[in-house]
Amino acid sequence: MPERVVISGWGQCTQPKLASPPFADPIDMMEQAARDAGRLCSSDIWQRVDTVLVVRTQSRNLERPGEEIARRLGIAAPHIRVSGIGGEVPQHFVNQAAGMLARGEAKAVLICGAETYYPRSADAVRGEDALIQGIPDDYAADDAVGSSELEQRHGLTLPIHGFPLFENALWAQSGLSREAWLARVGALWSRFSQVAANHPNAWSRDAQSAERIVTAAPDNRPICFPYTKRMVSQVMADLGAAIVMTTEREAATFSGGGAKPVYFLGGAFARDRQRFMIDKASFTRSPALATIIEKIEARSAKRIADLEGFDLYSCFPCAVNVARGQLGLGDDDPRPLTQTGGLGFFGGPGSNYALHGIATLAENIAAGKLENGMATALGWFMHKYAAGIYSSVPGDTDLIGNDQIDLADPEAGDEPIAHTEHVQGEGTIETYTVIYARDHSPQRVLIYGRDAEGQRFVANGATDSDTITRLTETNQIGQRVALQHDRADGLNHAALIA
């Protein structure tokens, strides 16, 4: 029989907005979450852990966080790994840990991560500008980059700039009016807020109505059309999470814990060949997630239809709706889509949110609220995806090499589509967004489309009131634009054709 892998302990912690000094830093919060997870396992768990996997902290530049966590917990001579950047990392770590445990390369694995983004001083960095403030200038990996140089030049640099491009494509696909589409999206996000309101670790525990979520107001400013502040990830949060993974055989020898082990039935990881937004053939689906679903159903011996619940990565509403489409979850599907309330309400700092989703899913399964469930996690603009299936009932599938297969051949989907650097003539809009300043005024219009030769372009549009009204009142996807390249600033410009 293949070696079964379990989550033996889970822990989460939150440093509230009104916390008193001295304030906990990310290492402190990792330690607290890990100790909570350890208490569910065994009185001697830290003598058994031999592998520490740390989700890279982005709110602070930490020196050797794995070694420090091991020192504080009394873990001797561990194998330590610190991740790169990406929301898929926690689930990808779980997949890798499962392979290590199944192959006998590890006896017990601690996965932990934490962020302390909430600004607690006058000079603290705020908002999306803080997203990767803890990444040093000499950071060598390119996973801190989510857009091409051409896209950055036109204003797409942060997640809040890119995900609305998916959202408006989904709106066009729906055929609904602006009001009807926002009502649908708002209703989804309202349900997420209600889940967060009942989660003890959620950053925001205020259930919101759909109308309040989608309606711009002084306390709910427009961010990037169609998103308001209440529709985007809540970065400014202080959260930590940890899980301990072992084999079923090892867990059977534990004493002094008491948590019911949760079985990991299988996972998968994939990376879209169409990495950047300008590369993507479609703004309404994810080839990486499609590949993962096919793999994970085979590896876990579970169909999506067999699952009782989900924690779908929920940085923005479109991420959930693209996942629902790929998973075949209709609007009338009664199964829960989030265990935490999602990144917009529970909180979604840095790369570590998915660890909270996994910890909460495991806790709910152990408590009997669900028999099984799936957690998904994505990096950047649905470029990297990971998922896992968890259950109260053991499976008999072999986990021994799945992670190695995915690492050796992670690519999914088609090659990037052809694009042009310099535009001229006419083109057709494929998707777009309006980026707003803090005073609610339109700051930039970002348009993606195809030129007369069928090549993808990215351009900026005008921000006059007539153009903004057309873009925000009725969906302009499929409309023609006049294209021009400005050699002076290196920008492409697109003007709506009446």
Image (spheres, grey):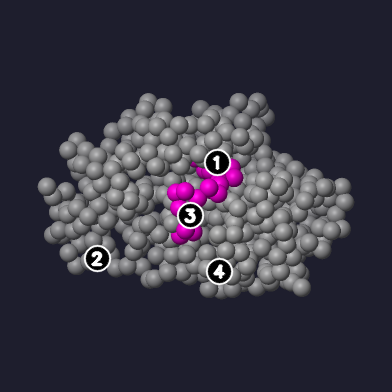
The residue pinned by badge 1 equals 341
Which residue is most to the left?
A: 498
Other residues around mark 3 within 10 Å, as few (<14) / some (14–19) / many (≥20): some
Q: Position of residue 242 (x, y in %)?
A: 68, 48
In three-dimensional space, the C-alpha distance between marks 1 and 4, rounded to whole angstroms, equals 27 Å
The residue pinned by badge 3 equals 329
Magenta region: which residues?
Answer: 326-350
Q: Nearer the viewer, mark 4 or mark 2?
A: 4
Other residues around mark 2 within 10 Å, as few (<14) / some (14–19) / many (≥20): some
The residue pinned by badge 4 equals 295
The residue pinned by badge 2 equals 455
At mark 3, the secondary structure is loop
Q: Amino acid at mark 1?
A: Gly
Quadrant for residue 374, please give it: bottom right
The residue lying toward the viewer, choosing from 100 and 53, is 100
At mark 1, the secondary structure is loop
Q: Which residue: 67% across, 46% down?
A: 369
